[in-house]
Image (spheres, rainbow, N blue to C red):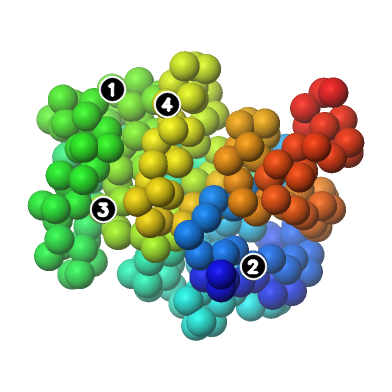
Amino acid sequence: MSAILEIRSLTAGYDGVSVIRDIDLAVEEGGIATIVGANGAGKTTTLRAISGVLRPIQGEVVFAGTPIQNLAPHDIVARGLVMVPEGRRLFPSLTVMENLELGAFQPHCKRKRSDSLERVFNIFPRLRERESQKAGTLSGGEQQMAAIGRALMSLPKVLMLDEPSLGLAPVVVRTLFDIVADINAMGTTVVLVEQNVKHALSISAQAWVLENGSIALRGTGPELLKDDNTRRAYLGM
Ligand SMILES: Nc1ncnc2c1ncn2[C@@H]1O[C@H](COP(=O)(O)OP(=O)(O)OP(=O)(O)O)[C@@H](O)[C@H]1O
Ligand SMILES: [Mg+2]
């Protein structure tokens, strides 16, 4: 197995103040990798620095062998590294279809638009039923599906999901995790940030615990699930 995404000594933050410091991690191609940590630990900051939305203060982000830390976000998406941000960020007054189409704005994605749409609708039959509905009127679970669907329209090699289960009912969360596992099984590497620690770790080949902007623990998901520190801090056991 080789790393498709490598972060080397990554430091990032806001207004020159670092929030994450000296992070090193390598995401193996083909698996599910999860970052967990308390509120404010720097999980979202890490994903934003990887996806180019936030310019790192220091360090390197290497995607498929190429340093990308100086590229614009749309160039990073074009290479196949796609983030579904915290809070979904759909365009509420556009329809589901229009939101999905926005995911396919790069030329190589536009060419495959109808195949991609068919794939998204097969994964999320609910979106097909809702295609003409305004995104702002969807349920929370449907909005998360639309946000993931839009990301899939960008033909990701690596899909990064920031707290996809946040605010969803338990039964919807289970469906969502199944779908994430299916998307991974179809060949997309997944990087997950989750508060739903137990569920996320149980399906993760790799996992990191972020504490105050640094990596405190790393291992396979099941290893961290067994770890006493993780259990005390995140599982209340
Ligand atoms: N735009 C911003 N400007 C200034 N500080 C920020 C900004 N965004 C986040 N921070 C700070 O950076 C720290 C880490 O935030 P981040 O959003 O990365 O945490 P997180 O691990 O994703 O937390 P959560 O679980 O609550 O989503 C926090 O102290 C936060 O206040
Ligand atoms: Mg966050």
Q: What's the distance in space between the residues labelled 2 and 3, CA to CA?
A: 25 Å
Instruction: Choose the circle earlier in sequence order: 2 or 3.
Output: 2
Q: What's the distance in space between the residues labelled 3 and 1, CA to CA?
A: 21 Å
Picture coordinates of residue 83, whole percent (x, y): 45, 54
Callout 3: CB less than 8 Å from ligand 2: no
Callout 2: CB less than 8 Å from ligand 1: no
Q: Quadrant of the N terminus?
A: bottom right
- For label 1, the crowd category at 10 Å Cα-Cα, with few meaning under 14, some 14 to 19 and many 20 or more, is some
**Residue situated in front as seen by the camera: 74 or 176:** 176
Tell me the number on the disc at residue 137.
1
* Rendered position, 10 above or below 112: below
Q: Is residue 12 left or right of residue 71?
A: right
**Residue farthest toward the bottom in the current orientation of the protein:** 66
Picture coordinates of residue 15, whole percent (x, y): 69, 63
Instruction: Choose the circle earlier in sequence order: 3 or 4.
Output: 3
Callout 2: SS: strand
Q: Quadrant of the C terminus?
A: top right
Quadrant for residue 56, please give it: bottom right
Tell me the number on the disc at residue 175.
4
Tell me the number on the disc at residue 153.
3
Q: What's the distance in space between the residues labelled 4 and 1, CA to CA?
A: 20 Å
Residue found 35% across the figure and 51% down from its top: 186
Quadrant for residue 76, please give it: bottom left
Three-letter residue code for mark 2: Ala
Tell me the number on the disc at residue 52.
none
Q: Is residue 156 left or right of residue 12?
A: left
**Residue situated in front as seen by the camera: 128 or 69:** 128
**Residue farthest toward the front in the current orientation of the protein:** 1
> Which residue is disc 2 drawn over?
26
Instruction: Choose the circle earlier in sequence order: 2 or 1.
Output: 2
Three-letter residue code for mark 1: Thr
